[in-house]
Amino acid sequence: MLSRRRFLRGTAAGLGGAVAAGSLAAPAVADDGREAISWDVETDIVVIGAGASGLPASIAARDEGAEVIVVEHHFDIGGIAIMSGGNIAIGGGNRLQVAVGQNDSPDQVFARITRPVEERFADRALVRRYVDEQVATFDFLEANGVNFDRHGTAVANEGSPGVTSATQVRPHEWPVRVAVLSHDQGRNGSGIVRPLELSARNKGVQFLLSHTVTEIHREQPFAGRVTGVRVEEVDRWFQPVHRVLNIRARKGIIICSGGHGHNVAFRTMFDPRLTEEYQWHGQHTAVANGVPSIAAIRIGAALGSTGNETQDGTGNAPDKGRWGVQDNYVRGAQTPESATFFRHRATGLTAAFGDVLLVKENGLRFWDETDNSEDGYFAHALEPTGVPGKLLGGGPVWAIFDAETVARRGYGTSYPDVDRAGGYFFSGETLEELAGQLHYNQYQLRPMPGDVLRETVERFNSFVDTGTDADFGRTNLQHKIQTPPFYAAWSTPVLHDSYTGLRATPECQVVDMTGRPIPGLYVAGESLGGIKQHGLGRCIATGRIAGRECVRAS
Amino acid sequence: MSPSTKTVRILPVRIELAPPVPEIVDVGAAFQVRLAIEATFAAGLSGAPFTVREEDSGAAVLVGRLPEVTRISADSFEYDPRHGPVDLRDRAVLTLRAPSEIGSFRWRVELPEYPFGNVVYAAASVSLHFETKEHVLSLAVWDNPSPVSSRGWFGVKVGAKCSAGCDLADEPIEIVDAEGAVVGCGELGIVPWSGTECLHWTMIDVLAPAGEGLRRWSARIGAGFGRAHHGRQAGASFSCVVTKPPECLLTIEVVDKDKNAPVADIVVRSGPYRSVTDREGKAFMRVPRGTFRLAVLGDNIEAPSQTIEIDEDKRVTIAARVLPERDPYERYWRT
Ligand SMILES: Cc1cc2nc3c(=O)[nH]c(=O)nc-3n(C[C@H](O)[C@H](O)[C@H](O)COP(=O)(O)OP(=O)(O)OC[C@H]3O[C@@H](n4cnc5c(N)ncnc54)[C@H](O)[C@@H]3O)c2cc1C
Ligand SMILES: [Zn+2]
């Protein structure tokens, strides 16, 4: 293990001077004789994760006078929030809404996100606290440098059936280009996380980047306060470099580590169909493997409102995704100028489902390509195809198209548009040749029979001739797929949002399996269960609540 | 210390096969083997001798020198430690030729001890087991129009490709109808189809049958094809709708009903006939007399389909609603 002095020398730049040598306590001695933890560093509050919830949590805790260290897995702050569009569902009658004449109130917001059917599993007590603090959260963001765009204030999805509507506000994009991860498509999330980072640093919050929390220490296995965290240093590929630290948290620990969608074991607790082939939005930017939540479960924490996770509706379900790239979330496109492009490897193509046919790993079509429904397209995409031993998950979905599609859509067919080297985009001079390559993709568990793919395409082409899709009733049949070369692009559904996380009180204090709050342990953002609403609003607001309440309770 | 007792530094070398590992290769064809190499300064092995031997008899199959040994790029998939080992990061790509008979083969790639400057790279080897198979031919058919007039000629392009990349120029191609009768033939050309490396192709004229409805043909390698080791019969089928010969000109004009402006580049369909609107929003089709269902296709356009009766040249205007460029992912709110 790393000595205290080496740690201080090694990370002095990252942690600044605030970790004074005098504040380092003697090694903790457990009174039940368990191996004592030797603390390498000590602070009041440890925040796990520097994204949409972690940054406000750290500032709120610091504003209450606490010393704060944020431990972040990635080599930069921002979480997946930095890739986001930055549209924040925070209403309730905030300054901007008043300025543009938008009528809103906490009660209206509450009514919108606790509907009897769509949000039936929402934890009303948590939601109430969340909506009551929305205006204050907006003010908090402005006070910490977030510069809102007056024209970004909108009501999204008003009246769309099945989709939660929300009032949204949006900041301007962060003006420093190198500090924006996703360029040229309105990824205004940078306008949230960069100002908050700046404010946090100015206020004395310290960031320990490229370190991941693997365990949460508690006085007793299932009792007493939480005392600190075990962290490991990781490299830019998120791999451990085998340096371990223990950080003591005198006043509390706040889990802000995002969702668990990239952890197959975790997500299949809720939906067993979500096997390994499904990628998770933002997986090459920030991890969402639920490790801190699992650490909390190991010391007694419970999960909350688990029904939210699998309920159809606002999009915890899979998304149809972009093409030809592994992390194929629709809004997650990255260009080579991004600092994390080396992990993404390609930008991907904007899908045009009306121009192609989609097949599964067996070379067969499975549904109307232009459909988007949960019980139609997605239910069938996720159905197994008969790969021996694979009884769950539908395997890869490939978009099959031809040279004319490429010309019509202006698609790039090589780096950096698509990821050929990784096995997410292929071409072939005939359909058989195309099919013969697909098993280079790690999730294509058996070769796709070339004659099956060819017959599928020929049959589809005859539907284009007659104007009738005799198999799946697709009406938009414009173009045959026939002109060589042929292409196959990864089009497998991609997952986003975790709607279940740790169970907590309205103050965001984690609750254990017996219903009792765990002293010192708090949670926010997508790590928190209970609020059925997509995205940034709940993450920022609960981050701020958790940061403040964690210090006040100590 | 006298010069004669000077110790030589031996650098250990490890080699493995990097993916894609050739397991089944085309008989008699060239194939590539990617060696993954782990050694201190592996680039020093560039130009080092290697021997490929039959594992059982020890007979040499090929003697040569390694091409340049290069480090895989840190931005590549192979480098990503989440997908593979973190050592073995240097590569040398060998081009070998498969034996010209069908069978299983056990070879070994050997790098003998190799002195380089004042060090010696230790000997290393890796086995290479593979089978040879017949070349696989596959076909593609494109540019076939639909619909076509009964008893009228139409042309299709047919291309063929050998999995081993053999030059198929001059090889025969046949078009066969649903009853198995050969209705067209041709020979593959010399220049591969644009955008391909070895898809040799030709244009073949086919006479449409009498009658109406969806008809299917298939293309296959012609009877005169006689190359060894190309056993598998390749085929591809294509279809089109056969109709009565056209008698009337149908002009369809698509108008944006909100802006009262023409809508260009929209696919319109009347029965089996398809056409695309031009800059003036007009699409033209020559159709026989009859009753057709007229529809506008596209992601961003909405117009009720209508039934039209045609007994002479006709102009039809479709008032369509053009929707704002639809976000293919609009299932969720703005994110
Ligand atoms: C492309 C994209 C667009 C989006 N657009 C919008 C939008 O416009 N509006 C909207 O409302 N929502 C949007 N979202 C969703 C929104 O960004 C997320 O809901 C939100 O960022 C989640 O916040 P969080 O704090 O829970 O997680 P994150 O912001 O991801 O932060 C979690 C952080 O924890 C770190 N971490 C994880 N595990 C550990 C560990 N063990 N130790 C240390 N650190 C760890 C991660 O690296 C990460 O930095 C978008 C998401 C994506 C991917
Ligand atoms: Zn051949």
Image: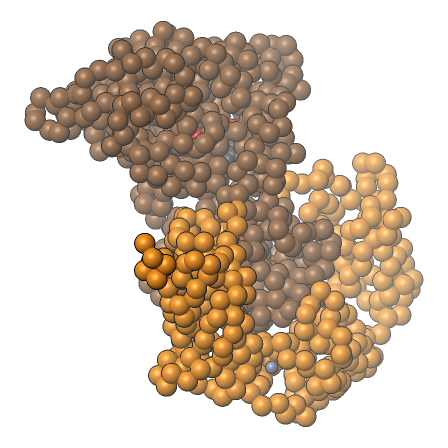
Chain colours: A brown, B orange
**Of all residues shown, which one is farthest toward the front?**
B2
Q: Is residue A439 above or below residue A238?
A: below
Residue B21 locus on image (x, y percent): 45, 67
Task: Determine which quarter of the picture holds residue B245.
Answer: bottom right
Q: Considering depth in this image, is B333 or B3 the residue closer to the camera?
A: B3
Q: Pinpoint residue B127: horizontal percent, then vertical percent.
A: 38, 72
- Residue occupying image coordinates x 31% and y 8%: A552
User: Quick check: A460 left or right of B292?
Assistant: left
Quarter of the picture containing the C terminus of chain B is top right
The x, y position of residue A63, in whole percent, is 41, 8
Which residue is found at the position 73% from the left and 56% from the top?
Answer: A407
Residue visible at 78% across and 44% down in the picture: B320
Residue A450 x %, y %: 54, 71
Q: In terms of image quadrants, where is residue A188?
A: top right
For residue A194, above or below residue B279: above
**Quadrant location, ligand no. 2:** bottom right
Dividing the picture into quadrants, the one containing residue A87 is top right
- Residue at image position (51%, 60%) is B69
- B66 or A267: nearer the viewer: B66
Give the answer, above or below, for where B90 lies relative to B131: above
Above or below for A126 versus A361: above
Q: Quadrant of the N terminus of chain B?
A: bottom left
- Can residue B269 be seen? yes
Q: What is the tally of numbered marks visible in this picture? A: 0
Q: Nearer the viewer, residue A16 or A324?
A: A16
Q: Is residue A159 visible?
A: no
